Image (spheres, rainbow, N blue to C red):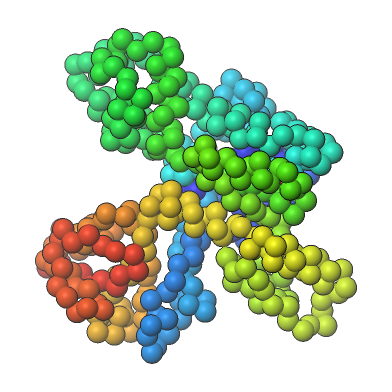
């Protein structure tokens, strides 16, 4: 399963973002280092369900939106020099080892300083936060790559780049990402000639390739407009930035759970249910969130997850079925599974994801909509419904 890591300075709203996306019961508080041990949970990417074109609804989606599971990891806050052990230090960065993509939850309101201590709204520049978090992440990689570098680089000379790939496998770095990073910044092929700065540059590049970052400009509900536009302008520097209110999303998810509102995560609006249990204070809070969503186009939380999964990681959703006429499994469940696959995946890759035996015995696939036979090298497309025919 894809893994999304939440990073950011203390008190920025990581656990609130996590709780709103997973509904896991985690601690949230207005002081730094609330989270110490990483939280793991299941969040969801939202996609249009193919059953909207069918007579029979699948029963696995909400109003035609399918929520496909992804893993989410919420970690301790990072402070400047975390890679040297400051704050909760280096070992906490290691919770991000397996993350495929990182959401940097930035406090756009500027109401917490770089250590996460509460300050007056607008008094801390969130752009500084973006820079230092990125630096900490790349210095963390650098620290690991640098370890024993003399020996590693000599081995690379004799045995090739796979040596480095093996060393970095635990960080989720592939040999391809290593090679591309070296090309990107035109480092000499002879790794033993790399200077300190080359190693740093390599670390910075390889982490960007293996763990792309998306910025959630959080606390938009209380953030000064100036801060929001400063953060949004980061797109000129190649960043993906999305404004969020994790607290707003959490309030909606809780209200939805209690049947106070009708809300589908990712929607730009919600409907308040006429309910005697809602008191004036709750109603006011919901109205406040409603207005904010109207102005900003939603709470942004689902949008961040979707952008991370579909834009940064370039995934597609594919629906494997056993009966291509009815689009069901053998028990008659309509569109029982939704799989996330990397764009460019082939029919045979899907077979392997269903089961390794099915992959080994792959004969051909069938596009359920077009009733067309597909070979193992057929490149799957977003939203396709596929039957795999296998000898096993
Ligand atoms: N106004 C507003 N407050 C928020 C938002 N998201 C989080 N908060 C508040 O920010 C404070 C910190 O939230 P947490 O989710 O605990 O932050 P964290 O990043 O997990 O903090 P650490 O675990 O200490 O690193 C809490 O008081 C939250 O209620 C938001 O979107 N808007
Ligand atoms: Mg936390």
Above or below 355: residue 193: above
**Residue at point 19%, 73% (across, down):** 366
Relative horizontal placement of residue 189, taking residue 124 as reference (left or right): left
Could you say where residue 9 lies in the image, as x and y percent from the top left? 66, 36
Q: Does any portion of residue 291 appear in the rendered image?
A: yes
Place residue 293 in its image quadrant.
bottom right
Q: Does any portion of residue 282 appear in the rendered image?
A: no
Could you say where residue 292 lies in the image, as x and y percent from the top left? 73, 62
Could you say where residue 270 lies in the image, as x and y percent from the top left? 67, 73
**Residue at point 40%, 18% (across, down):** 199
Query: Which quadrant of the rendered structure holds the N terminus?
Result: bottom left
Of 262 and 227, nearer the camera is 227
Q: Residue furthest right?
A: 280
Of 332 and 214, nearer the camera is 214
Could you say where residue 15 lies in the image, as x and y percent from the top left? 65, 49
**Residue at point 73%, 43% (across, down):** 226
Place residue 83 in its image quadrant.
top right
Query: Which quadrant of the rendered structure holds the C terminus?
Result: bottom left
Relative horizontal placement of residue 357, taking residue 330 as reference (left or right): left
Q: Residue furthest bottom?
A: 55
Above or below 158: residue 97: below
């Amino acid at each position: 399963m894809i893994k999304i890591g939440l990073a950011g300075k203390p008190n920025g709203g990581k656990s609130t973002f996590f709780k709103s996306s997973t509904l896991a019961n985690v601690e949230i508080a207005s002081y730094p280092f609330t989270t110490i041990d990483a939280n793991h949970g299941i969040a969801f990417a939202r996609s249009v369900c193919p059953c909207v074109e069918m007579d029979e609804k699948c029963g696995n989606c909400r109003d035609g939106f399918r929520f496909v599971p992804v893993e989410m990891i919420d970690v301790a806050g990072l402070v400047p020099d975390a890679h040297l052990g400051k704050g909760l230090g280096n070992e906490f960065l290691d919770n991000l080892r397996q993350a495929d993509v990182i959401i940097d939850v930035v406090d756009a309101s500027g109401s917490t300083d770089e250590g996460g201590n509460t300050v007056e709204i607008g008094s801390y520049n969130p752009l500084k936060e973006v820079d230092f978090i990125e630096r900490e992440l790349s210095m963390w990689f650098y620290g690991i790559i640098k370890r024993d570098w003399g020996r590693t680089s000599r081995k690379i000379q004799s045995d090739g780049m796979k040596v480095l790939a093996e060393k970095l496998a635990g960080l989720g770095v592939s040999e391809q990402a290593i090679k591309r990073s070296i090309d990107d910044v035109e480092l000499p092929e002879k790794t033993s000639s790399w200077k300190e700065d080359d190693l740093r540059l390599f670390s910075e590049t390889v982490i960007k390739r293996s763990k792309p970052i998306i910025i959630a400009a959080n606390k938009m509900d209380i953030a000064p407009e100036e801060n929001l536009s400063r953060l949004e302008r980061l797109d000129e520097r190649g960043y993906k930035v999305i404004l969020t209110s994790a607290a707003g999303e959490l309030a909606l998810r809780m209200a939805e759970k209690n049947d106070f509102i009708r809300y589908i995560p990712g929607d730009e609006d919600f409907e308040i249910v006429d309910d005697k249990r809602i008191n004036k204070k709750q109603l006011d809070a919901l109205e406040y969130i409603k207005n904010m969503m109207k102005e900003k186009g939603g709470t942004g939380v689902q949008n961040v997850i979707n952008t991370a999964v579909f834009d940064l990681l370039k995934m597609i959703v594919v629906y494997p079925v056993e009966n291509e006429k009815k689009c069901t499994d053998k028990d008659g469940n309509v569109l029982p599974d939704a799989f996330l696959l990397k764009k460019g995946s082939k029919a045979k890759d899907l077979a392997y994801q269903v089961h390794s035996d099915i992959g080994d015995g792959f004969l051909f696939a069938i596009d359920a909509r077009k009733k067309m036979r597909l070979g193992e090298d057929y490149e799957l497309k977003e939203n396709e419904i596929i039957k795999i025919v296998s000898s096993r």
